Image: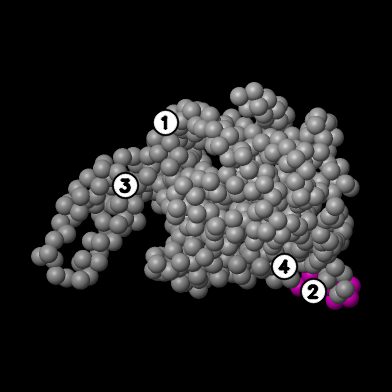
Amino acid sequence: MDRFAKLLKRSARTYKTHWIGNIVIVFLVNVIIGGYALSSSGLINSIQPYEPIKNTAIDVIEDKIQINDRLIDRDTLDKLDSRTDKAIKTFERATGNSNAGTISELIYGISGFNENSGEKGIFEGTEYYRGVITTTINKITASGSIVFGIVQAVNTLIFKDKIANSIVILVATLFLLLITIFVKNILSVGMCRYFEEHRLYKGTRADRVLFIYRYGKALNVAKIMFLRSMFQVFWDLTIIGGFIKYYEYSMIPYILAENPTISSKEAFRLSKEMTKGYKKRLFLYDIIFIPGFLISSFSFNILSILLFDPLKTCFNTEVFADLRKTAMDRDIPEKKLFWDRGLDLEDMRNSTYPEAVFPLKPASHRNWLKYDYERDYTFSSIVLLFFTYSIVGWVWEVFYNLFDTGLLSNRGTLNGPWLPIYGCGGLLIIMILKPLRRHPVLMFIGAVILCGGLEYFTSWMLEQLFHSKWWDYTGMFMNLNGRICLEGLIIFGVAGLMFTYIFSPILDNVFRKIPANFRTSFCAILLAIFILDVMFSVASPNRGAGITEEDTYRPSNTVASVIEGTDPGT
């Protein structure tokens, strides 16, 4: 037990050093590799409505609209089925059975908004039933798997649930296998590398989790980790052999984290030598941690996330370091495979890992095309950028609407093939946010705020002037009065980065190659046509199916109104 106490003391020291970073790294890697079940979280399930209540409500709905064998009219049956589905969906929204709604309700509760104050805005969780983020959250939390949830969300959003579940499962399984081999296993080894360095160097950076990718050894590591998993499955069939091999193979990720060039035979042989005579002790170490994880189960696994998981990870790293030192002291033939002299220290230092001592050199990376994103744009370039972004935005919305609704329509308030809100957003990012160009994170935040404000104001102004809505985000995750939503704001932020660092510099280079006289004349013609279009559209704005939605009152969003046929959406 003295040895355990010594290892635990060192683990606690490592855990307390930049403890927030340790928690975040362990949590994120475990989420990616499947260490946390999203759908079984007590925090989510504790605020979900009971399934029997939902089923009872569905029975009442079906009794109310009297679906029975006496109805022989196919059209009538289809209409009643449609109304039943709508009522069920409305019930789920009204009771918070959408996990996207549940999450937003949790935020609403934490924020302290008064339910009756009319201030909820983006926190109206029970109305979230549209959009990519909403669908993805619901599918992931319903399936308990990020991969299955994403594939099912794609099936719902793009193929309208027309793909058979068997095909969805097959595609998701194959995708999950690839993710496991080339992402999960690699990140598991990367996390081992991070803690191997972090136990000795206080300045270890979080990006050391990507150590294997950085040195271009992902294929070798992926192969060995796959063989380890496959052999473990076969040994598990013998039950007892599975326990023995679990601990015999337990050092392989740490060995690969130190020496990613090692062969599979060498990795398995070295791990076997390191754990020879220590398997029972490793088993007892795991037993000692069990009470802590049992206690954590009563805290919705919060204690595991904040304490036991990162502490156990630090402890496992200390065990590896201890067995590594023991194996080297025993002078085993395989000790030459411990080739990283930077891991031979005994005491923690303030510096970062001396990468110069590592036997490998980082893999060479292609120098991607770089442009002067801090440039000043001429007036003609600004005009051409405005029309380029406006036209691209129009093309995007036309095809998106065609794909989503089957309607080919001229999107926007104007009659020409452009959506000026895209052009204005692009220009505001280029001109107003110029001081933030050296800071991508601030640029992202600035683009979100600037474009979000532009979209909200434009939506409000159009509703006031024309009493119509050219877009409505009601039902999408974290929307504010249906005018902006989280999904759109994220797109604005990403687009702002792409406008600033990629598209605008590239397009400006192209525009500058156009003869000056022709460029000036072309800009003047575009501006004249645009101004005429604006003047005409003020008197007669572009409206119609797939374009506008008249400004009527919002649905009451109750099951009763759907059943009785009084809901405006029926």
Q: Secondary structure at mark 3?
A: helix
Tell me the mark number nearer the camera, choosing from 2 and 3.
3
Q: Position of residue 14 (x, y in %)?
A: 71, 30
Q: Secondary structure at mark 2?
A: helix
Q: Secondary structure at mark 1?
A: loop
Q: Residue 55: tell me if it is visible.
A: yes
Q: Which numbered disc, 2 or 1, marks the residue that appears first in the sequence?
A: 1
> How far separated are the C-alphas under marks 1 and 4?
45 Å
Q: Choose top left, top right, bottom left or bottom right for residue 374.
A: bottom right
Which of the numbered marks, if any, corresponds to residue 91? 3
Disc 2 marks which residue? 522
Colour pattern: one colour
Residue type for callout 3 = Phe
Magenta residues, start to end: 515-525
Residue at x-position 72% and y-position 45%: 193
Q: Quadrant of the N terminus?
A: top right
Viewer-nearest residue: 437 or 565: 437
Q: Is residue 267 above or below residue 330?
A: below
User: Could you tell me what secondary structure mostly forms the magenta stretch?
Assistant: helix
